[in-house]
Image: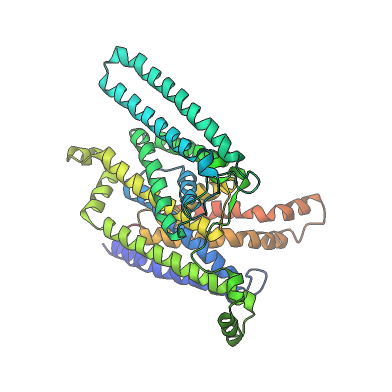
């Protein structure tokens, strides 16, 4: 009994201690200038902002894995769909794009979805021998009609002002309205995927989500009419002022002079602080909702299903339906993070959606922080993101120290040139240490 109480007391203090460690690291990054830290608040706040977005990603994955035991290996795909939201909602309309083929694309997409729906109904309602012939016929006719409508429309849109646009454009609405749209896009995709994949075993679900995530990213790279593909989509509006606008504002110039900071540094810090406040507010609201849900009867039911599906099913719980529910909710949170990220960057670059960064690293954040614990996932995300960024700087310093006894030559040169990639080794080492000494994470589930 005493060991149990000691373990509970230890876990109770872990979250505050880790929080203080994270605060200390960011303070050192902002105030201390040496080989390990930049001594720049611009750098510290830039890391913090992406850390907060990573915390939202980790929170979404934790809902799926920590609440329901669903292994989503396609995080990058839902993130990319969320990033599409600001492009379609907040970027200005492209002149002539809708006239060239916008409505025809909409009709083609409706035909495609209608074909899938009709084929599903045929499979369900038509007797087995006949459905084997009717369903392929429905799919074939629908596919031909879809391509007949879709291909000419896409070519017309991509040919419209191809040098600077070549895409359908957005609605020109405020970018904050695009964040729930990004979440909705990811949720809709998760619903379609979940209706099929959640009936599979957990290992098959992981393989299915991994493949579908890569398919989503491939579509964004190749469908130039949607978001310019690999040409990238820049100029995404921001919810905060631009640095140049602040630098031309006499009031802000006077404030920067009063603070004793040059105008370029002050404007960068001010903009990043505004982003940090906005992202922090979103994160706190999500944590509040997640905590309320986790401690509700619904949350207890989800954890009961996670721990023993057979017993939960025997008590009349709809296992697949609940799994679909949490899969959609978690994917929506991941999509929200994607919309936040592309808003921060002001750029959608489909080529940058790397599974190593946006799937593997997010899973490291959840596991290190503590799956099933919302605060643990958030703290783990911010900590791992800080280490991921600084490992690129700390790696060469460590490698320089380790190779100092070696004579100058090909081996030492190769090690020093490879040192920036030490971040991959560092993340693997951190994961192994946590799994060995704290298998339930730094802040384990209660």
Q: Is residue 257 visible?
A: yes
The reply, left or right, for residue 270 in relation to residue 143 is right
The reply, left or right, for residue 145 in relation to residue 265 is left
The reply, left or right, for residue 85 in relation to residue 258 is left
Residue 207: image quadrant is: top left
Q: Looking at the image, which residue is at 30% across and 45% down?
A: 325
Direction bottom: furthest residue = 258
Residue 244 in the image: x percent, y percent? 61, 70
Residue 65 in the image: x percent, y percent? 37, 48
Q: Looking at the image, which residue is at 27% across and 43% down?
A: 322
Residue 327: image quadrant is: top left
Q: Looking at the image, which residue is at 35% across and 61% down?
A: 287
What quarter of the picture does the N terminus occupy?
bottom left
Direction right: furthest residue = 408
> Between 135 and 38, which is closer to the camera in this rendering?
135
Direction left: furthest residue = 315
Q: How many marks are shown on the rendered structure?
A: 0
Residue 102 in the image: x percent, y percent? 49, 40
Q: Is residue 438 visible?
A: no
Give the colour scheme shown.
rainbow
Q: In this rendering, is residue 144 above or below 248?
A: above
Q: Looking at the image, which residue is at 59% across and 40% down?
A: 158
The reply, left or right, for residue 333 in relation to residue 40 is left
Residue 107 in the image: x percent, y percent? 43, 35
Residue 235: image quadrant is: bottom right
What quarter of the picture does the C terminus occupy?
bottom left
Q: In this rendering, is residue 154 above or below 172?
A: above
């Amino acid at each position: 009994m005493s060991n149990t109480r000691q373990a509970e007391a230890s876990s109770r203090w872990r979250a505050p201690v880790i929080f203080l460690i994270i605060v200390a690291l960011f303070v050192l990054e902002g105030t201390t200038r040496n080989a390990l830290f930049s001594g720049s608040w611009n750098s510290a706040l830039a890391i913090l902002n992406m850390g907060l977005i990573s915390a939202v990603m980790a929170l979404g994955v934790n809902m799926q894995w920590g609440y329901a035991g669903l292994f989503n290996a396609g995080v990058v795909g839902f993130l990319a769909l969320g990033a599409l939201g600001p492009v379609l909602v907040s970027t200005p309309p492209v002149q002539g794009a809708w006239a060239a083929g916008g409505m025809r694309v909409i009709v083609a997409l409706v035909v495609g979805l209608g074909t899938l729906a009709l084929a599903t109904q045929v499979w369900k309602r038509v007797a087995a021998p006949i459905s084997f012939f009717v369903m392929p016929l429905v799919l074939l006719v629908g596919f031909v009609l879809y391509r007949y409508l879709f291909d000419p429309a896409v070519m017309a849109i991509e040919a419209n002002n191809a040098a600077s646009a070549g895409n359908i454009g957005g609605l020109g609405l405020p970018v904050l309205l695009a964040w729930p749209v990004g979440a909705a896009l990811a949720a809709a995709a998760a619903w379609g995927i979940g209706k099929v994949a959640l009936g599979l075993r957990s290992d098959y679900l992981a393989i299915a989500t991994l493949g579908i995530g890569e398919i989503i990213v491939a579509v964004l790279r190749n469908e130039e009419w949607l978001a310019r593909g690999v040409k990238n989509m820049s100029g995404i509006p921001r919810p905060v002022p631009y640095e140049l606008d602040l630098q031309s504002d006499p009031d802000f110039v006077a404030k920067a002079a009063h603070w004793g900071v040059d105008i370029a540094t002050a404007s960068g810090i001010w903009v990043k602080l505004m982003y940090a406040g906005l992202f922090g507010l979103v994160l706190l609201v999500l944590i509040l909702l997640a905590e309320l849900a986790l401690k509700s009867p619904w949350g207890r039911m989800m954890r009961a299903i996670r721990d023993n599906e057979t017993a939960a099913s025997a008590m009349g719980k709809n296992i697949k339906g609940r799994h679909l529910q949490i899969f959609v909710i978690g994917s929506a949170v991941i999509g929200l993070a994607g919309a936040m990220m592309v808003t921060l960057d002001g750029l959608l670059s489909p080529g940058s959606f790397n599974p190593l960064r946006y799937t593997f690293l997010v899973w490291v954040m959840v596991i290190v922080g503590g799956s099933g614990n919302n605060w643990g996932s958030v703290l783990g995300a911010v900590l791992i993101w800080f280490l991921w960024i600084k490992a690129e700087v700390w790696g060469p310093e460590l490698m320089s120290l380790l190779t100092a006894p070696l004579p100058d030559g090909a081996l030492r040169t190769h090690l020093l040139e490879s040192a920036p990639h030490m971040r991959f080794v560092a993340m693997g080492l951190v994961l192994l240490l946590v799994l060995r000494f704290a298998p339930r994470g730094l802040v384990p589930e209660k």
